[in-house]
Amino acid sequence: MKINKSDLERIAVRPDQYPEADKAEIAFAGRSNVGKSSLLNLITCRKKLARVSGAPGKTRTINFYVINDEFRIVDLPGYGYAKVSKSVSSTWGDMVENYLQDRENLLKVIQLVDIRHAPSNQDVQMYKYLKFYGLDGVVVATKADKVSKNELYKGINVIRKTLGLSDDDIVIPISSLKKTGQEKLLSVMAELLEEYNETAKE
Ligand code: GTP
Ligand code: MG
């Protein structure tokens, strides 16, 4: 799959602000600063489609992007950002949970984890949650440029073990900085969309 068109369609914090559920959606979830917005920019070949920052907590809303006029990528706000107050973090929970629980056109949530660190408790929790809703199965290991080849394999194993992945689940190492690994993710996304369109026809 090649992405040749991408536009920010909607910024939402509540369900009544979501766009119509007329297109399949694939969401990006993960700790704040893990590289969700950078990954979106990488696969769309747009430097500034989503805002990226060295300071965690950049994306604080649910951002819907229309891709190739066909489906959406949904950039979710990151969790685990220590500086937000309790009330802000409970709003985060409500915001993301509402979206994950009730979105009928949500096809898959791609969970991002940093290749350099073992997944945090919150990552594990998030993945369990995705499993519960049947949205699990694809994990991206970000910032692959920061480790050696050897560390990369070790990192993937740690991610597999800690998140409790099954053999069918996939982990895709990607570097948004060096622009590596994205083809695999794009082909996985294309397959998912194909399946979705097939079942929609039935
Ligand atoms: P929130 O919006 O806070 O949830 O963060 P995010 O997950 O969207 O992360 P973002 O894409 O804003 O990236 C956070 C920081 O990590 C930025 O400084 C990026 O430049 C950096 N970064 C992201 N991807 C990579 C990567 O593949 N390699 C390296 N070296 N840095 C990366
Ligand atoms: Mg972001």
Image (cartoon, rainbow, N blue to C red):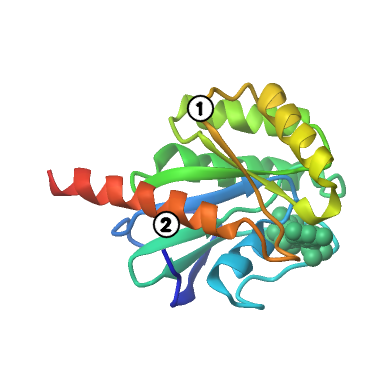
Q: Where is mark 2, residue-wise?
A: 16
For residue 181, above or below residue 179: above
Q: Quadrant of residue 57?
A: bottom right
Q: What residue type is disc 2 on?
A: Asp
Mark 2 neighbour class, 10 Å CA radius: few under 14, some 14 to 19, many 20 or more: few
In the structure shown, which secondary structural element does the residue marked by tag 2 occupy? helix
For residue 3, above or below residue 191: below
Q: Quadrant of ligand 2?
A: bottom right
Mark nearer the N terminus (1 vs 2) = 2
In the structure shown, which secondary structural element does the residue marked by tag 1 occupy? helix
Q: 150 and 85: which one is in front?
A: 150
Mark 1 neighbour class, 10 Å CA radius: few under 14, some 14 to 19, many 20 or more: few
Quarter of the image with the N terminus is bottom left
Query: Left or right: 99 with respect to 195?
Result: right
Residue shown at the point (68%, 28%) measured from the top left: 124
Q: CA distance from mark 1 to mark 2?
A: 26 Å
Q: 55 and 182: which one is in front?
A: 182
Could one spot residue 143 in this view of the protein?
A: no
Residue 198 rendering spot, x and y as whole percentages: 21, 47
Residue 72 rendering spot, x and y as whole percentages: 42, 61
Q: What residue type is disc 1 on?
A: Lys
Residue that extends furthest to the front in the rendered view of this protein: 150
Q: 141 and 73: which one is in front?
A: 141
Quarter of the image with the C terminus is top left
Could one spot residue 108 in this view of the protein?
A: yes
Residue shown at the point (29%, 51%) measured from the top left: 194
Q: Where is mark 1, residue-wise?
A: 131
Q: Quadrant of residue 117?
A: top right
Query: Left or right: 185 with respect to 156?
Result: left
Q: 154 and 7: which one is in front?
A: 154
